[in-house]
Amino acid sequence: MLQDPVRRRLYEYVAAQGREVGRNEAAEAAGVTRTLAAHHLDKLAEAGLLESGSRRLTGRSGPGAGRPAKVYVRARAERSVSLPARDYRTAAELLAEAAEQAGLDAGLCAAAHRRGEALRGSAAPCGGLDEAMEMLAARGYEPYLEGAEETAGLEARVVRMRNCPFHVIAERFPPLVCGMNLALLQGLFGTDGPVRARMDARRGECCVVVEPSKNNGD
């Protein structure tokens, strides 16, 4: 489905916006005609990768407001393909349930912190928000900079994440898994660098945000 380069660009653009996207906007972003964009967007919706609807993009209503336009947003459902079939989700849920019942939160967070440090390797702590966003994107968090247009200084900005790689398990065991996620990112970014990870849950997004450290003198 995403092997076609145009279709993949359209999907990635819509997914990255975190809001409804119209055909004209998507076509311009992908550098293709509106007709071609509409074809691929509808195919993505048919495959369940996008959700489609309609609304007036002008923001007006009533006579003279124009016809509603078709809009697209990334589908909320999670999909994975494994050949032959594997059931890692059930295993993860069972392990999370056992850890929660046994009160192993502290041990899990310690292990997650060590894993974050191992992922960073011998590299120095993350150098700033731009580098943090690259690291998060590489791990599937889909980061974006909140306040990028409202503030002039990086110190006032926060990196939020549209995707939680542990979403399904986090929904069933939020304190356990969100604590693990925070510890993982704290290990990945270090504790003495210019950025820090902290908990700041927001519905539909990752429970962790990344921001400049309070002790960052830059």
Image (cartoon, rainbow, N blue to C red):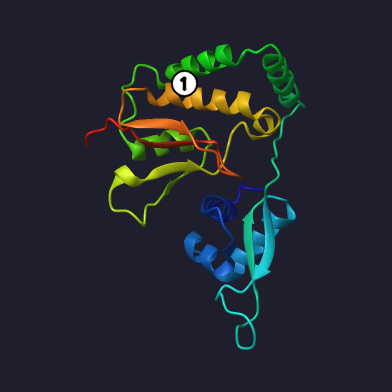
Q: Which residue is mark 1?
A: 116
The image quadrant where one finds the C terminus is: top left
Name the residue rendered at 44%, 16% in the picture.
118
Q: Reply above or below: 199 against 46.
A: above
Name the residue rendered at 71%, 35% in the picture.
81
130 relative position to 168: left or right: left
Q: Residue furthest bottom?
A: 63
Question: In which quadrant of the rendered view does residue 86 lie?
Answer: top right
Q: Amino acid at mark 1?
A: Gly
What is the x, y in percent for residue 100?
68, 18
What is the x, y in percent for residue 130?
35, 40
175 relative position to 115: left or right: right
What is the x, y in percent for residue 26?
54, 63
What is the x, y in percent for residue 178?
58, 28
105 relative position to 79: left or right: left
Judging depth in this view, the residue of 140 and 175 nearest the camera is 175
Q: Reply above or below: 196 against 202.
A: above
Q: Reply above or below: 109 against 181.
A: above
Q: Residue furthest left?
A: 218
